[in-house]
Amino acid sequence: MMSGQAGPVTVVLIALLVLWYVGAVFMNAPTQIDRYNRADQTWTTSKLIEDTLAQERPILPAPHQVAQEMYKTIFATKITSKRSLVYHSWVTLSSTLLGFASGTLLGIILAVGIVHVTTLEKSLMPWVISSQTIPILAIAPMIIVVLGAIGIKGVIPKAVISTYLCFFPITISMVKGLRSPQVIQLDLMRTYNASKWQTFWQLRLPSAMPYLFASLKVAIAISLVGAIVGELPTGAQAGLGARLLAGSYYGQTIQIWSALLTAAFVAAIMVVIVGWFERRVLARMGVKA
Amino acid sequence: MTLKEVVNNVAEMPASKNAVVDIKNLSLTFQTADGPVYALSEVDLTIDEGDFVSFIGPSGCGKTTLLRVIADLEKATGGDISINGVSPEQARENRAYGYVFQAPALLPWRSIERNVTLPLEIMELSKEERIKRAHDALKLVELNGFEKKFPWQLSGGMQQRASIARALSFDADLLLMDEPFGALDEIVRDHLNEQLLKLWARTNKTVAFVTHSIPEAVYLSSKIVVMSPRPGRIIDVIETDFPKDRTLDIRETPEFLEIAHRVREGLRAGHSNDE
């Protein structure tokens, strides 16, 4: 399966890199020409291209500049250092995982309640949906400030924001999943005089597993977004969000892009890990490979 | 058991016949947006212990609904019904019957063996007992050797046999079957009918069997209940006296054809009513 995908993925990657280089040259050329003019320097096209890809604070840094910065801050810096992206990634990841865990738990509990209790469906479902219509960028600083005021700081407020974002897809798809058993299967359980709990455990929950994993992949990715958003209003202390913010304060575009790409890699790795669990669980449940 | 005892047992059998299902003046009306639908009307029926009763009729005649009322999957809106002398709800709570649906309804994430042990798990039997019973039930439907397979690895006929094994696993005396072989081809169906008859002869269970096939009804039954739609009602009850160990060959005999003819006449009469 991997070998079948490797070709197309490589082609897309190369196309993106080419586009990125072309873009970097064009985006950075005006400031570079400006610089030549002020220094009364003569320049050729090849020198211009070379220089646009090696600026210290380019508008769009070239891929190799970002790669160098990432190598430097991920592998060549001690992970305890405040300059290490591994350190910042871990700060973000810890609240991502905490938020993901509590969001998953909350999402499943809400779904179980909604499926089993009619009044909960009527009273909770509108709130679940309207919770997501509030822009997270507006509510995130409130959560940080309010929790900070009662003495809760650090990882928990960020995890709360992640929870707030990621419980939603889980609730929605678990409600659908827990309702996915066919009428005939529910009738079958009734003929055995199965209790609600037995029906849930033996029929509803296993039926919901494919739905759960689909939503977990979405949830883990937006949980990371929540953690990063949560790091923005904290005054750029630590985390990938803080690196993004610090980078934009000081015009360190290369730093911004490395933090951005690192966040994307972290998200991708987590989605892959969830996918691995999904395959393991579904294979145990006899799903055709 | 001595020969004399066997003879005595056989002689006593008619005397020990009890009504397993007793239905008096039963009716069921569904209230729908388009007005009431009379699914069952004035149904009177007794199913005795050891009977094989077939319900036959065109779609909409209430045969499946009647079976579902017996199983407490639907509630009657009028009349009386008792299963083993208690209400259908109590009978269901006592796990008095095994139900086989039109589709196998196997849980795809469980192996065949674990599908058969599902009711036993719900009834909280010990693990050894569950495995033993699943083994016995799968043997009855000739599916031993397929314990570890998943449902998708089996053909439609084998899946339906597995669902029969599941209904047999907790050894209820009453077996309710709702067109279990309706979706299968003729040859598989004949084979499963033969197996079902052997099973019935061996276990002496009481069977209620819904079908829309006249040969199937006549071949399997000790009693054929002919039904007609709008409102769903019984228009004829035909007793047959083929031996329990009958073979498919009886379908060529004059008695068989005569009963089949009577069933067809009944169905036709019910149908013309409707026109």
Image: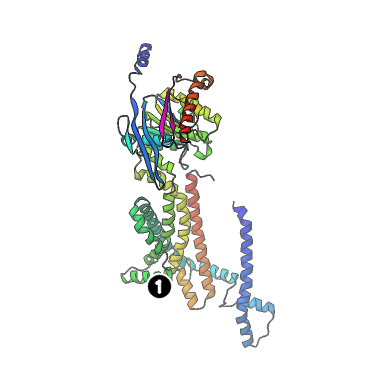
Measuring from the top left, give residue B252's x and y in whole percent: 54, 20
Going 63% across and 69% down the picture, which residue do you hit? A19
Q: Is residue A154 left or right of residue B194?
A: left
The quadrant where residue A56 appears? bottom right
**A218 versus B107 height, above or below:** below
Mark 1, Cα crowd under 10 Å, few <14 / some 14-19 / many 20+, is some
Secondary structure character of the magenta stretch overall: strand
Q: Residue at x 34, y 34 (%)?
A: B26
Nearer the observer, B138 or A39 = B138
Up the image or down, B12 lies above or below A116; here it is: above
Does residue A109 appear in this view? Answer: yes
Out of A141 and A63, give the one closest to the viewer: A141
Q: Which residue is mark 1?
A: A234
Q: Which residues are magenta?
A: B223-243
Q: Is residue B122 left or right of residue A220?
A: left
Residue B200: percent from left, percent from top: 43, 25
Q: Quadrant of residue A231?
A: bottom left
Q: Is residue B229 magenta?
A: yes
Residue type marked 1: Thr
